[in-house]
Amino acid sequence: MNIRAATLPLAALMIAVAAPAQAQFYVGGMLGRSDASADRQGRDDAFLDLGFLSASTSSHDKDTAYRVFAGYQFVPYFGLEAAYTDLGSTRFRTDVDPPGALAGESSVKGEELTAVGRYPIGEKFAVYGRAGVYFARTQTTYRAEGSVELVDGADRQRKRTTKPVYAVGAS
C-alpha cells in the first residue's frame, strides 16, 4: 500500500514531463440552487421533550449556491482541480407555547481538492469523473425569544468537517 502511494505521484510527474504539449490550465464557475433537508418534526419533538406544550417549526431550505474552480489537466486523461464552494444558508424558526421562539441560520462553505479523470470521445466531446474531498465550514447563529433561553455562548456555533465529493459528467 505505501509503495503504491509513493509511486503514483512519480508516475504522474513522469507523464506530465513526457507530454507537456497536451497539458492545460483551466478556470470556471458554477451557479445553482442548494436545497437542504430540515428535520422539522425532530426539532418540534425536542421542544416537547423539554416540557413545552406545543412546538411548530418552519424553515427556508433553499438558497443560491456557487462554485469557482481552477484546474490543471496534465494529460488528456488526468488533472487536478481546486475549488471554493458556497452552499448558501438555511433558516428555521420554532415557535413554542408558552410563547417563545428559537430562530437560527446556518451557512456552509469550504474548499475542494479533486482528481479529474477524463476520457475524450472524438475531438470535441469527453466524459469525466471527479473524486476528492470537501473541507466544509458550517456556521450557525441562534436567537431566542420569550420563554426560550439560550445557554451562554450557544448563540454561535462553528463546525469543520471533511466530506468526500464526486461527480460524473460530459463536456
Image (cartoon, grey):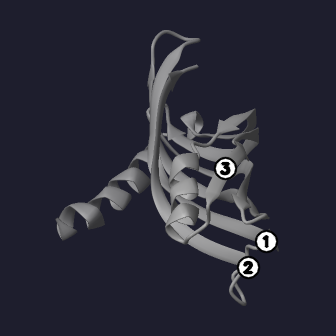
Residue most extreme to the bottom: 152
Question: For the residues carrying marks 1 and 3, which lies nearer the camera in this image?
Answer: 3
Q: Is residue 131 above or below residue 3?
A: above
40 horizontally vs 57: left or right:
left
What residue is shown at x 49% (from left), y 9% (from top)?
Answer: 122
Q: CA distance from mark 2 to mark 3?
A: 17 Å
> What residue did someone put label 2 on?
149
The 10 Å Cα crowd at callout 1, few under 14, some 14 to 19, many 20 or more, is some
N-terminal-most mark, 2 or 3: 3
What residue is shown at x 71% (from left), y 45% (from top)?
Answer: 59
Corner quadrant of residue 52: bottom right
> What residue did someone put label 3 on?
56
> What residue did someone put label 1 on?
144
* Numbered disc 1: secondary structure: strand
Q: CA distance from mark 2 to mark 1?
A: 6 Å
Residue 169, how many percent across, how many down?
50, 24
* Numbered disc 2: secondary structure: loop
What residue is shown at x 45% (from left), y 12% (from top)?
Answer: 121
Residue 115, how many percent across, how many down?
46, 47
Corner quadrant of residue 2: bottom left
Q: Can you say which quadrant of the picture contains the N terminus?
A: bottom left
Residue 72, how many percent across, how many down?
60, 45
Task: Check disc 3 and give the amino acid type.
Answer: Ser
Q: Please tell me which residue lies in front, 146 or 74.
A: 146
The 10 Å Cα crowd at callout 2, few under 14, some 14 to 19, many 20 or more, is few
Q: Can you say which quadrant of the picture contains the C terminus?
A: top right
Task: Check disc 1 and give the amino acid type.
Answer: Ala
CB of mark 2 within 8 Å of CB of mark 3?
no
66 horizontally vs 2: left or right:
right
Q: Please tell me which residue lies in front, 128 or 87.
A: 87
